[in-house]
């Protein structure tokens, strides 16, 4: 067989003439492998499983939480006080709140803006409960006052005047 390969003959029948007409050998003791299993032997091997996910996560950016100074904190406190007084009078003010949401995987997070009606302000727990409607119906969102960056709305904007 090697004689034909070394001589660079063109016709494969001449190169493999000594084995071309023999029947294909199959083991009598081992079962024939399915085409699916045979193909799986040659599929690409992922030696670094999860590496792409890790690189994507590392490249994802997060924001740092903005620390408000005393004047900004006082302004937000006035806005929350006006909203709280409106709640006590039976009004349900609609506001837009920009707040910080911590990232569960990294240090930092992102700022999101949500619009809805204020249902409750709890000064003891330092939380605001915002009621909004999404695709599934009404939803209550509890927001820590320390995470609030900005509050906008008819009543809240009175504090800016």
Image (spheres, helix red, strand yellow):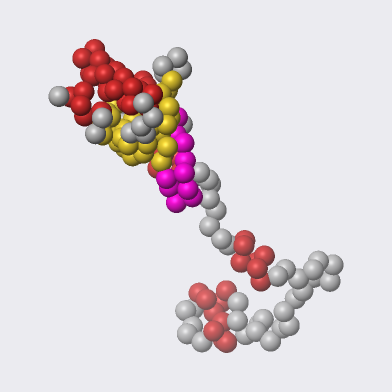
Instruction: Tell me where residue 143 appears, x and y as whole percent.
Output: 41, 28
With respect to residue 87, does 114 lie above or below? below
Instruction: Count how many numbered circles sit on residues in the image.
Output: 0
Is 53 included in the stretch rendered in magenta?
no
Residue 79 visible, this angle: yes
Region of the chain picked out in magenta, as a range: 133-144
Q: Nearer the viewer, residue 117 or 115?
A: 117
Q: Residue at x 25, y 28 (%)?
A: 156
Left or right of residue 57, residue 79 in this image = left
Quadrant of the image for the N terminus? Answer: bottom right
Quadrant of the image for the C terminus? Answer: top left
Q: Nearer the viewer, residue 76 or 89?
A: 89
Q: Nearer the viewer, residue 135 or 121?
A: 121
Left or right of residue 54, residue 45 in this image = right
Instruction: Tell me where residue 132 appears, x and y as whole percent.
Output: 41, 41
Left or right of residue 66, residue 123 in this image = right
- Residue with the most extreme top position: 70
Q: Residue at x 44, y 34 (%)?
A: 141
With respect to residue 65, does 12 lie above or below? below
Q: Residue at x 32, y 36 (%)?
A: 94
Q: Residue at x 35, y 23 (%)?
A: 84
Instruction: Tell me where residue 58 appears, x and y as whole percent.
Output: 39, 36
Is 140 included in the stretch rendered in magenta?
yes
Instruction: Tell me where residue 158 appears, x and y as whole percent.
Output: 20, 26
- Residue with the most extreme left position: 161
Q: Quadrant of residue 148?
A: top left
């Amino acid at each position: 067989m090697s004689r034909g390969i070394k001589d660079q003959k063109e016709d494969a029948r001449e190169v493999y003439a000594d084995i071309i007409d023999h029947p294909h050998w199959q083991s009598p003791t081992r079962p024939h492998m399915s085409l699916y299993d045979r193909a799986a032997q040659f599929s690409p091997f992922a030696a670094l499983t999860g590496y792409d996910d890790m690189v994507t996560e590392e490249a994802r950016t997060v924001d740092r939480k903005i620390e408000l100074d005393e004047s900004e904190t006082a302004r937000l406190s006035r806005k929350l006080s006006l909203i709280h007084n409106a709640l006590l009078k039976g009004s349900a003010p609609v506001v837009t709140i920009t707040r910080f949401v911590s990232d569960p995987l990294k240090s930092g997070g992102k700022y999101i803006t949500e619009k809805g009606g204020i249902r409750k302000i709890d000064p003891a727990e330092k939380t605001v409960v915002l009621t909004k409607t999404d695709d599934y119906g009404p939803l209550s969102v509890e927001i820590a006052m320390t995470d609030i960056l900005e509050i906008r709305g008819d009543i809240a904007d009175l504090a800016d005047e």
